[in-house]
Image (cartoon, rainbow, N blue to C red):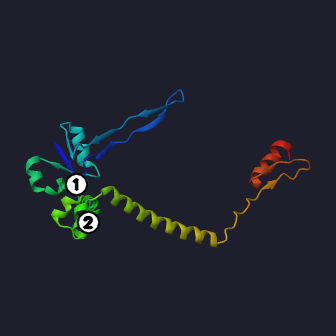
Amino acid sequence: MIFMSKAKRLRVILKPSFHVIDANGQRVLIPGKTIEFANGRYETQDPDEISALLKHSLFNAKFVAVEDEQAWKEEHPEYFQPPVNMITGAMSTIFSAPSPLVEASQMGLRNSQQTAAPIDIDKIIEEKIAEKFGALSSKLDRLLNVVNDTSITPPKAKKTFKCPVPGCDFVGRTGIEVGAHKKAVHGA
């Protein structure tokens, strides 16, 4: 039987693995059973696997059983389309920076002038970096001025507890710790 999923590498845990302690006190791993989809598809003829997958809580939520794979692919093309946000994200990355030709056309240069006077891309990159660095440094200056203007108080000292027995210099972080010390060392 064939199972299909929108997730390209879906992992379905049929039987979780766990640890037990053997007779020697050693921790032993008892392996479980995991089904891994490859490219959104998993095929098996094992009746135990088929039964477990059909009863699984993710069945019909994250994956489905398919009789005729080709007909199912034609009926459900959304399983094979990349998500829209992935496409728009890639397109915004590609088109976020204007090309040198776009900048040249914005400066009023025509095609004949573009070929005669090539654009210095290194110069454009340096100008963009200087522009961004200037903006970043001004924001950093404002942030440092805000930090310097506010009064910063040092953190409070943590309370400590001293052993009440005369001549003992033990200092603990909690009263319980000092009490345990007093009982163990001084027998009191």
- Marks 2 and 1, the one that precedes in the sequence: 1
Tell me the SS state at disc 2: helix
**Crowd class of label 1 (few under 14; some 14 to 19; many from 20; radius 10 Å):** few
Q: Which of the pair 144/184 is nearer the observer?
A: 144
Tell me the SS state at disc 1: loop
Whether residue 120 is situated above or below residue 36 in the rendered picture = below
Image side of residue 41 versus residue 182, left or right: left
Please state which amino acid type lies under the numbered disc 2.
Glu
Whether residue 185 is situated above or below residue 179 in the rendered picture = above
**Crowd class of label 2 (few under 14; some 14 to 19; many from 20; radius 10 Å):** few
Residue most extreme to the right: 166
On residue 2, the disc is: none
Q: Which residue is mark 2?
A: 103
Residue 136 x, y percent position in the rendering: 47, 65
Please state which amino acid type lies under the numbered disc 1.
Asn
Q: Which residue is mark 1?
A: 60
Quarter of the picture holding the N terminus? top left
